[in-house]
Amino acid sequence: MATVVSSVADICRSAKLASRTLARLDSGVKDAALEAIAVALEERLEEILQANERDMQAGRENEIGDALLDRLRLDERRIRAIAGAVRQIAALADPVGELIDGRRLPNGLDVRKVRVPLGVVAVVYEARPNVTIDAASLCLKSGNAIVLRGSSSAEHSNAALAQIASEAAVAVGLPQGCVSLVAGGGREELAELATQKDSVDLIIPRGGEGLKEALQAVATVPVIYAASGNCHVYVDAAAALDQAEAIVLNSKIQRPGVCNAAETLLVHDDVAPQFVPRIVDALQSAGVLVRADERTLALVRDAGGPAAALLQAAVEEDWAKEYLAMTLAVRVVDTAQEAIEHIARYGSGHSEAIVTRDTAAARAFQLGVDAACVYVNASTRFTDGGEFGMGAEIGNSTQKLHVRGPIGLRELCTFKYLVEGDGHVRA
Amino acid sequence: MATVVSSVADICRSAKLASRTLARLDSGVKDAALEAIAVALEERLEEILQANERDMQAGRENEIGDALLDRLRLDERRIRAIAGAVRQIAALADPVGELIDGRRLPNGLDVRKVRVPLGVVAVVYEARPNVTIDAASLCLKSGNAIVLRGSSSAEHSNAALAQIASEAAVAVGLPQGCVSLVAGGGREELAELATQKDSVDLIIPRGGEGLKEALQAVATVPVIYAASGNCHVYVDAAAALDQAEAIVLNSKIQRPGVCNAAETLLVHDDVAPQFVPRIVDALQSAGVLVRADERTLALVRDAGGPAAALLQAAVEEDWAKEYLAMTLAVRVVDTAQEAIEHIARYGSGHSEAIVTRDTAAARAFQLGVDAACVYVNASTRFTDGGEFGMGAEIGNSTQKLHVRGPIGLRELCTFKYLVEGDGHVRA
């Protein structure tokens, strides 16, 4: 049970045992468990609100600030939204058992490559208590047991949510240990969790750079690091400039604090005299601070008006920075190739966009840019499991092994080869 | 060039640069480079033999032993076989650009998930110099640059082979740095290589446990560890016993020193009185040392004859041991479920086989056993990239992330999402 205090190693071993049962469950049983969790969240609303109030009170006493308090806060509307998200995950296709590939070998052996759960997934996360349920639902749907480790600031909320999820799932036939929460938000628990390589198959950290560094220093369990995104929009010589303006603005300001927001705009020299003053003006009107290279500065000055006074000169560090704020670096380049080189040097391999009407430029950009998602004539903001039709995601990966981009249900799986013969032996 | 002495970091940076060109090459160019390598190996045979003789001489002086000397030795036949393997890899389908998945999103965006090279793959290997060319061919075919780090005992052979491959590839248009060899087989070079995470995308070690442990202690670059295989054959109550005998013998003795050879035989109690004396006799006749649990011991004693005297009693450690030798542990179990539990406890997740005529037992085994390859009525020895129709392999993975089982051309790739719109922005 989620609230029994056990050692991290015990929790993980129990999760491993549960995972072996989970891997064999039919979709219907898993979906019934998710529905039971959604119902339990709605029925035990008061209990959740009381636990959350204890965290909120501690947060106010510790003066964690309004932004963090808002992330921590649960209310009836938010809890119903969490239950709704569980039902949406239940409605997705089961990735387990999906046939990925298969053939009959020349010797008559039938080989099928079939998707199976990873086993035990540990999710390490910060303030938002809704992650407790989102992550648990994604893991159970994909046949994995989950070990949660939240932050101490959301201790009571997370404990209540994990206990409700665990009880509801077990009540409809899922194994004990399918959902557990590691008590204590300290670095020792993190290190202990990150070294249970006999029982934990994957750790997914959802948090800032401090959490990643702490994990990198100690983890022996495989880790998929959620992305940092230094994303670019490149406006090509052959861009439709109205589209370019809309895409740049959307990529930067639609939600500036997330990893798929653009951080640098690159503009081809041919269209820069027209486009740069116009986009700088539009960005500044929307409240974006522009860090400009020398050619951008000169173009804006030449255009006259008040925009130049608001510009800041970009320094080398700007090209590598993920602002996650209403700031955009702008640079003029001579060729599409120079844009590709810039992205190779400074990009983080997350989401990169070209705006162009030229098929050759589009093709060169998609071939030459090494990133999880490479867009032609679309905003970088679409990099998202929901948008991509994967239903939901547990984060975004910028690494190249196993998963790149959104981490959805399929990405929480591995595969096995099922091979069938009739007494076949190797010659 | 392969023989210029550069720092490991310089070599890796140069490989990274080369990888950006390699990723964009058409299949025809890559295949022409592989053909050029095969031709160069044949034409520069004498050079290779002379380099190899220097290593052989040093090996004899250092008394490395006949087995290692044989692994080290190149002769005309072996070099022609290496060239033949290069041509076989050239003939395989190019994994790069392969469409993995795709759809049109409700908003009209077209999303394609397309296979692309990883970038730079480092291969760390021991005595056999043929790995230099095998690994380079697989990496170039899959659009990756390769950084090789062989053992000091094969120093001159590896340097000659890497230089020939590099020169031949560059001569037909592949970029400088596409094939390089790290000079020096020391642990410092290994540690330096394993921490070039800005330029190396993956390290594949091919060697013993010592190499793995050395890497695990220092690597910040992602590593795919080649497998150790503690593989089982389970002979079910409903097994066809002739098939069972053939499969057990093939799994154990067809090539006992490799990771997909069987190390433990599990026999259902219902057929044990018939099958155990018979298979123990056959195994012993073939020169296999049998380590038997108590029930096996009793059955063989009851059957009479000389077999019992040759049996050894199995101890707890036997169940976890990868003998890689003509030794097999044997245990009698009461149910298929007990066999599955035994494999879950002691198996290494490599290759597991059930011999049965019962569809329910076969299904339970394939669902319940968590391993890269799960066989029904076939030998564990089929786990191999060549056998599976993947053309060739660079090793076998028992980990669950990215690749499980044979590591072939596709597994040396990652993917990216190519997304195309017409001015699409996120609402």
Image (cartoon, coloured by chain):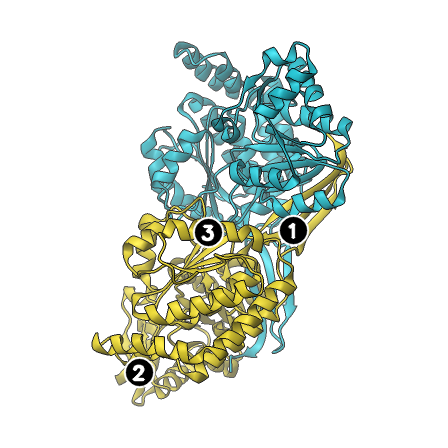
Chain colours: A yellow, B cyan
Does A200 sit above or below residue B275?
below
**Amino acid under disc 3:** Ser
Q: The C terminus of chain A appears in which quarter of the rendering? A: top right
Based on the displayed image, in which of its 4 quarters is residue A309 positioned? bottom left
Which of the two discs, 2 and 3, labels the residue nearer the N terminus?
3
Which of the two discs, 1 and 3, labels the residue nearer the N terminus?
3
Label 2 vs label 1, nearer the camera: 1
Is disc 2 placed on a helix, strand or loop?
helix
Q: The N terminus of chain A appears in which quarter of the rendering? A: bottom left
Please give the residue where the numbered disc 1 appears in the rendered image: A114
B58 or B46: nearer the viewer = B58
Please give the residue where the numbered disc 3 appears in the rendered image: A14
Q: Tell which subunit mark 1 falls on.
A: A
Residue drawn 33% across the image and 68% down it: A155
Q: Are marks 1 and 3 on the same chain?
A: yes
Q: Which mark is residue A301?
A: 2
Based on the displayed image, in which of its 4 quarters is residue B303 positioned? top right
Q: Tell which subunit mark 3 falls on.
A: A
Based on the displayed image, in which of its 4 quarters is residue B122 positioned? top left
**Amino acid under disc 1:** Val
- Residue A334 visible, this orientation: no
Q: Horizontal and vertical percent for residue A179?
A: 47, 61
Q: Horizontal and vertical percent for residue B60?
A: 43, 10
**Amino acid under disc 2:** Arg
The reply, left or right, for residue B339 in relation to residue A52 is right
